[in-house]
Image: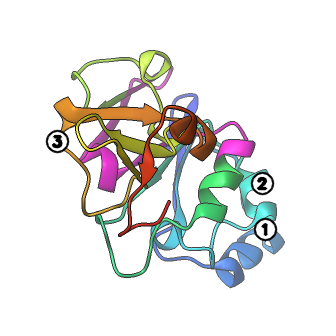
Amino acid sequence: MEHGEKRFIFTGDAEELSESEMIAGKQKLDADVLKVGHHGSSSSTSPQFLQAVAPQYAVIMCGAGNDYGHPHQEILTALEDAGVEVYRTDLDGTVIMTSDGDSINIESQKQDSGKSAAAVQPEAAIRYIGNKNSLKFHRPDCPNLPAEKNRIYFNSRDEALNEKFSPCSNCQP
């Protein structure tokens, strides 16, 4: 979808084969926003496809604590390494992006509405969530996450351990 100067690409459940066909078909793939394929599965968002799209933002649609482990860590790492700001429905709830053709505005259930994309803290930067009460830390997709008021966020496992937090026995971060 193209609107003025802004482009969005929606890949649905496309996996690497479909991505390769799009690249080989000389499709115009560069976009500001990538709806990540197949719920962030490692079977999609190949390095070649990510390079062809070169998005500023990505949206991963997946349920919290899903049985498939979506999104897969290798996709999150690839997006982070590419400097892409990631929004996830399992962490952010409904993600709404609007554009006037010159800019993109991003809103989600866990953010104050109306923030511009430049002002939004990407959830992808949060790798672990600690519980201030139990001093346990979790993966963002753990079903045992504490209430928001009891959370502390860590960028790395070492950071959580250095703060004397213990790993959750359920999600084993």
Residue 23 is situated, as x and y percent measured from the top left of the image, at 78, 68
Q: Which residue is mark 3?
A: 147
**Residue shown at the point (56%, 76%) measured from the top left:** 14
Sooner in the amino-acid sequence: mark 3 or mark 1: 1
Say whether residue 86 is magenta.
Answer: yes
Question: Which is nearer the N-term, disc 3 or disc 2?
Answer: 2
Label ID, residue 124: none
The disc labelled 3 sits on which kind of residue? Ala
Q: Of residues 76 and 34, which is closer to you in this image?
A: 76
Q: Where, by quadrant of the figure, is residue 45 drawn?
A: bottom right
Residue displayed at 35% across by 65% down:
62
- From the image, state whether disc 3 or disc 1 is nearer to you: 3
Asked if residue 139 lies left or right of residue 94, the reply is right
Say few, some or many: other residues with alpha carbon within 10 Å of mark 1 (under 14 / 14 to 19 / 20 or more).
some
Bounds of the magenta segment: 80-105
Quadrant in the picture for residue 9: bottom right
